């Protein structure tokens, strides 16, 4: 009956995902033996496979730019165990997109917080703790031998989204600058100079953009700028203000307006998402990642 109750307790706790979670505790799952050195815990030990689901905040998770981005799951744990022979537990951290990392968590004689990271797409992550090794034969564990899952959390991959934020802000700045110069009073030569500069800058940006949605929008703007440049060079020389040249300038302003609208919508969506994430993550332990995400939020806020 005691064993059955222990099994039911482990299954219930594992399913609830209440963290921190003691996955293995020798004092609860192994046999007590009193020795001249004090209490020791010996095999056989009751250890069942445990499943833990990562926490994830989906508030404001909308839009292809966000949903198609990279995410990160971090496992924080401690496995403090002083034993006669090494003790370890096999784990697998996997995501629904197929990415995974597997290894063994080994007990340490001293308290030593450790972590495991997995980068993946916008899907749910699960931790499987599958097998206890070393808890057979001549083995004894001192009190306090325990593996604890302190945190399992999924959040936006900081460096990826910080880069996207920088690119959106930079894209917006260059589009606004060109829009302000796409007027008849700028003059043919100066306008072509501004278009050339913008094309050169956006072409350079292409090398760093990882997001397909943003890359496609940038290619669309580049194609439009290139065709406008060709038309102006061929048909609208300095001092020419024909109806067709004026219409071409109007088309350029319309194209820039459309691109700005799309880009500003992306900035607003990403700002709302990352701002909600940083607020939620304030109670988590993700180290410098929190600062990187906060920097991304600050960048985006400058264009709102």
Image: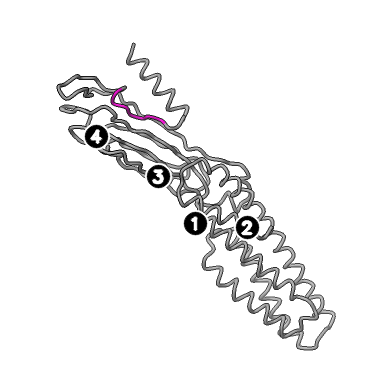
Circles 1 and 3, Cβ within 8 Å, touching? The answer is: no
Where is 71 relative to 244, above or below? above
Residue under label 1, please give it: 159
The 10 Å Cα crowd at callout 4, few under 14, some 14 to 19, many 20 or more, is: many
The residue that mark 4 highlights is 87
Q: Residue furthest right?
A: 243
- Which quarter of the picture shows residue 266? bottom right
What residue is at 68 percent from the left and 78 percent from the top?
Answer: 194
Kindly indicate the quadrant of the structure image that contains residue 82: top left
Q: Does label 2 or label 4 sit earlier along the sequence?
A: 4
Query: In this view of the protein, can residue 124 be seen by the observer?
Result: yes
Q: Which residue is mark 2?
A: 300
Q: Earlier in the sequence, mark 1 or mark 2?
A: 1
Image coordinates of residue 119 in percent, x first then y, are: 45, 49
Which quarter of the rendered picture does the N terminus lie within?
Answer: top left
- Residue at image x 16%, y 25%? 37
Measuring from the top left, give residue 90's x and y in whole percent: 31, 37
Q: How far is disc 1 from disc 3 in space, using C-alphas? A: 20 Å
At horizontal 56% and vertical 42% (from top left) the residue drawn is 280
Placement of 1 over or under 273, stated as above or below:
above
Label 1 sits on a secondary structure element that is: helix
Q: Which residues are magenta?
A: 21-27
The residue beneath circle 3 is 100
């Amino acid at each position: 009956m005691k064993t059955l109750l222990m099994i039911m307790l482990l299954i219930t706790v594992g399913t609830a995902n209440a963290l921190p979670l003691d996955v293995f505790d020798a004092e609860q799952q192994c046999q007590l033996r009193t020795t001249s050195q004090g209490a020791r815990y010996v095999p056989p030990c009751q250890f069942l496979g445990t499943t833990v689901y990562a926490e994830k905040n989906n508030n404001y998770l909308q839009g292809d730019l966000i949903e198609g981005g990279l995410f990160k799951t971090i496992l924080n744990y401690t496995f403090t165990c002083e034993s006669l022979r090494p003790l370890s537990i096999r784990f697998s951290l996997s995501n629904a997109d197929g990415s995974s990392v597997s290894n063994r968590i080994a007990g340490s004689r001293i308290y030593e917080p450790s972590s495991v990271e997995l980068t993946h797409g916008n899907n749910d992550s699960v931790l499987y703790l599958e097998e206890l090794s070393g808890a057979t034969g001549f083995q004894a564990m001192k009190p306090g031998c325990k593996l604890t899952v302190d945190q399992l959390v999924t959040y936006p991959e900081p460096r990826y989204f910080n880069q996207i934020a920088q690119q959106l802000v930079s894209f917006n700045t260059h589009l606004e600058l060109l829009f302000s110069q796409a007027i008849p009073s700028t003059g043919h030569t100066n306008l072509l100079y501004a278009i050339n500069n913008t094309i050169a800058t956006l072409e350079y940006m292409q090398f760093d953009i990882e997001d397909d949605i943003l890359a496609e929008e940038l290619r669309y703007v580049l194609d439009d700028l290139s065709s406008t440049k060709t038309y102006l060079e061929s048909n609208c020389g300095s001092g020419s203000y024909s109806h067709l040249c004026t219409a071409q300038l109007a088309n350029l302003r319309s194209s820039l307006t459309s691109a700005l609208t799309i880009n500003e919508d992306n900035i607003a969506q990403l700002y709302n998402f990352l701002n909600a994430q940083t607020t939620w993550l304030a109670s988590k332990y993700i180290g410098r990642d929190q600062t990187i995400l906060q920097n991304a939020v600050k960048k985006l806020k400058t264009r709102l």
